[in-house]
Amino acid sequence: MHKRIVVAGGDGFCGWPAALYLSAQGHDVTIIDNLSRRRIDQRLGIQSLTPIASPDQRLSAWYEITGRRLHFEQVDLAEDFDGLRAALAEIRPDTLVHFGEQRAAPYSMKDAARKLYTVNNNIRATHNLLVALTDLALDTHLVHLGSMGVYGYSDAGIEIPEGYLNLSVQDEGSDRREIEILYPASPGSVYHMSKVMDQQMFQFYAKNDRLRITDLHQGIVWGTQTEETRLDERLINRFDYDGDYGTVLNRFLMQAASGLPLTVHGTGGQTRAFIHLQDTVFCIGLAVENPPTAGSRVKIINQMTETHRLRDLAALVASVTGARIALVDNPRKEAAENDLRVSNRTLLDLGLRPITLAEGVLGETVDIAQKYIHRALPEMVAALSTWTVEQRPGVVTADALARGRQILT
Ligand code: NAD
Ligand code: USQ
């Protein structure tokens, strides 16, 4: 059945190809975005490696090529509750897919202003959406893009379940009680912390207002193009490679294309979850088609297809491209080594057949990186956001002095 769908954050890296995919499936899609990401790029002095067209050009290209209309409304989810409420009252969406948040961990750790912005933007955007839906008494299914990072990367020694953990606890007597809790959160950045806060809001509104909510705990998305964005250069997706917004695999591929060493943080013993962009949009489609019923708990789905240790990932990219690998000081505060096992049963059961990091698929992203390398700004590649003051180059702290004295004596 064709639905009315709002894609909030639909001008971004995941949101744009998802909007095209849903439109291609025959749904009536409206993008809501405040274009903040394009402004952040300008302020940082960076640009997508790929030349992304303006929203107007994107929409007319899509219509010209497919005959399908996509709609666009420029609304700030966090700052303009009235505008958001009015847009939703008009559209009355069956489904709202929420990508509209500040999503870079390094950007969220850059300084006080970006920490404040990330929390204010993300929490208010999510809460405004929840309030607008309840205030309008809409039976909209909210599909939110969450993050695998809410679980954290401490070795629990178990497969990470899909959101909830079943515990067997001894009560005051000798009886054992079975309880279900949200998997204990352990965010690793202010950005990831905002996703943990989103989770709590979803729990409340699902319980109190019977909102139907799916929270997709997504891994790191790699790749650039999907079947739809490939149709025309005006539909091309963004490719971030800079120290704040570039994610690890896309950064490695860009570094390889520009003859730079692959920057592995620390020992590269960190293990992370990954998913290809084409699978992301397919999974969004599955989530849209399989809403929870009103009154049921938040449906949490782990949206990832494979895990990789970073030094193995770097070795794979190096073997395909001939790039060198550099172990650099880790600007983040994170476990140097961790194992990661994750259940992604829901999506597999719904029919996901994962695209894995096979050489052929990697090849397309290598090609994109090479094709547009003339647009790259190599000086923007270094990851300069540090997680703590002590990690900032040139900062001398009491602790560092004490350590220095120990070394000297
Ligand atoms: P992106 O920065 O490319 O896109 C986010 C979009 O949201 C941008 O177009 C931006 O302008 C818009 N936006 C931000 N704040 C807004 C606001 N207040 N009002 C209206 N629009 C707003 O990010 P992305 O990579 O596409 O990520 C989308 C979502 O998916 C994020 O919530 C992110 O946490 C999640 N996610 C991304 C990845 C990844 O690897 N990219 C992995 C897991 C989860
Ligand atoms: N890393 C390197 N070298 C680099 C860049 C990163 O070794 O040049 C390391 C980081 O230290 C980290 C890992 O690679 O250990 C992943 O970093 P990332 O920037 O690729 O991903 P992350 O910060 O976790 O954030 C990204 C998205 C975010 C999403 C998250 C999914 O930006 O929106 O929520 O992936 S997850 O990691 O599963 O939580």
Image (tube, rainbow, N blue to C red):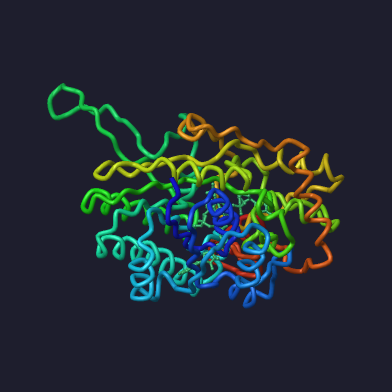
Q: Nearer the viewer, residue 237 or 317?
A: 237
Who's the residue at 36% across and 66% down the image?
A: 88
Q: Nearer the viewer, residue 42 or 107?
A: 42
Q: Position of residue 268 (x, y in %)?
A: 67, 44
Who's the residue at 17% across and 29% down the image?
A: 171
Q: Is residue 25 left or right of residue 172?
A: right
Task: Classify the position of the N terminus by image quarter.
Answer: top left
Task: Classify the position of the C terminus by image quarter.
Answer: bottom right
Q: Position of residue 313 (x, y in %)?
A: 71, 41
Q: Position of residue 4 (x, y in %)?
A: 42, 56
The residue most toward the left is: 173
Is residue 265 visible in the rendered image? The answer is no
In the picture shown, does residue 290 fall above or below 137? above
Q: Is residue 315 left or right of residue 137?
A: right
Q: Position of residue 204 (x, y in %)?
A: 26, 52
In the picture shown, does residue 337 fall above or below 44? above
In the picture shown, does residue 67 fall above or below 290? below
